[in-house]
Amino acid sequence: MSTSPAAPHDAFAALRHRDFSIVTINQFCLTLAILMQEVIVAYALYHLTRDPLVLGFIGLAEAIPFIALSLWGGYFADRYNRQIIMQICMVLSLPLPLVLSALFSSHEHGHLTAQQLSLGVYGIIFLMGTIRGFYSPAVTSLKPFLVPRNLYPNAATWTTIGWQSAVVLGPVTGGLLLGYLGLHPTLYLVTGLLLMCSVLLALLKRRSFPPIEHDSVLLSLSEGFRFIFKTKIIFWSISLDLVSVLFGGVVALLPIYADDILKVGAEGLGLLRAAPSVGALLMMVLLAKYPPTQHAWRNMLLAVAGFGVFTLVFAFSTTMWLSLLALALTGAFDSISVVVRQTILQIFPPENLRGRVAAVNGMFVSSSNELGAFESGVAARYLTVIPATILGGTITLLVAALTYFKTRDLLNVDVEHSKPVEVKE
């Protein structure tokens, strides 16, 4: 682990560590590439099929392998060299945008039907989810070795800034490039970004990692599950976040809104897709000065309710400016609930359970976007898009109300000064 000193109160302290800067730039480029590809493929496939269900299957195709393999990815990250795993994953990812381009090209020349094209796209997305299941735990577990312990908060801040910036720029860039350059040149640019990521990883200093003794993976994780179910504030915080994203999220349906309702095309889709992240980024800046951890549980409930309310506003909107505002506010309210939940997950689990609780939380929350995309696609297919969005916002509000009645005793809990829950292993 790096031990070089850093100047006190240095806002750029973590970035002065070469390998951390490389990994941060790599993560920015990778997130940018993934979101550009996600936006253009979803829009192009829906534009061809006019079937909302294809948007749901795109999310499901990525979620299935990620959920199935992420725990084993964490095991491999602990057992083998993290940097080598990341490099292998990146090399395996490189040809996938080119294969997507070839599939669309074959359809354009009449060699593939729309159904065959859709199946091919799902297969490539499935491979990407498989790679992500191993890459994500490896990069997450590498970061503590790149900066000294006293710079962890500063490193986390820069990691979040880099990720949120890519989340804002990726959809906008993808939509604009799709509109002005077309599908195939944009996929070539995605390949170029992945190649840049691979080169950056090759520049990392070689390092070894301490060996870790492992118990049974399933037995170890079961202790994390039991702790979550027994600890009320953790169980309900994870449940709230999972339900709001699973049912209330509208991101997967944005190609339909852009094409059929708002009539703004691929360029407008990029703006719609970026709006929640813009709202989240602005709220994060505000929360840095005014953290939501005082009256944390009240703020959590209000944030989830606000997410549901502005999902409904978006559902009824027929103008671009109101749709953008509603999406930005869903992102802003979601960021409040994320901050509260992350604080709860850091404070309440004891040291010897913190990693396992985080792993179980990651299984549910990290995959909820993809599962939510599938739910949204199915609902839009059978209810049409606006009723499906109204249903999602309504379910979110109902769950927030149910949670309030189930957890009123948590409203007075002082989260900031709480101590870890003691458990007997």
Image (cartoon, grey):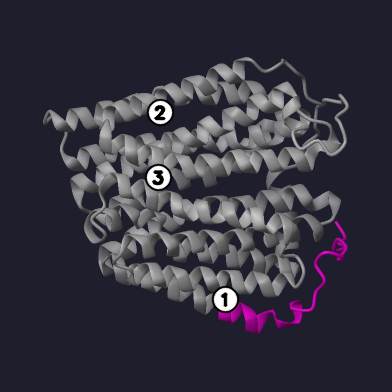
Name the residue nearer the viewer: 259 or 369: 259
Look at 23% across and 56% down and name the residue there. 263
Q: Quadrant of residue 342?
A: bottom right
Judged left or right of residue 126, residue 206 is: right
Reading the image, the residue beneath label 2 is 190
Quadrant in which the N terminus is drawn: top right
Look at 78% across and 32% down and name the residue there. 13
Nearer the N terminus, badge 3 or badge 2? Answer: 3
Name the residue nearer the viewer: 412 or 172: 172
Of badges 2 and 1, the one in the foreground is 2
Reading the image, the residue beneath label 3 is 61
Q: Position of residue 326 (x, y in %)?
A: 44, 65
Nearer the N terminus, badge 3 or badge 1? Answer: 3
Tell me the amino acid under the disc marked 2: Val
Per the model, the C-alpha gap separating discs 3 and 2 is 20 Å
Judged left or right of residue 150, residue 326 is: left
Of badges 3 and 2, the one in the foreground is 2
Label 2–label 1 contact, CB within 8 A: no
Q: Crowding at label 1, few (<14), some or many (≥20) Cα neighbours within 10 Å? A: many
Q: Does dot 1 land on a helix, a strand or a loop? A: helix
Of badges 3 and 1, the one in the foreground is 1
Tell me the amino acid under the disc marked 3: Ala
Q: Does dot 3 land on a helix, a strand or a loop? A: helix
Query: Do we see residue 122 in this rendering?
Result: no
Name the residue nearer the viewer: 38 or 13: 13
Q: Which residues are magenta?
A: 400-425
Q: Is residue 103 on the magenta stretch?
A: no
In the displayed structure, 389 sits above or below 12; it is below
Reading the image, the residue beneath label 1 is 400
Judged left or right of residue 237, residue 305 is: left
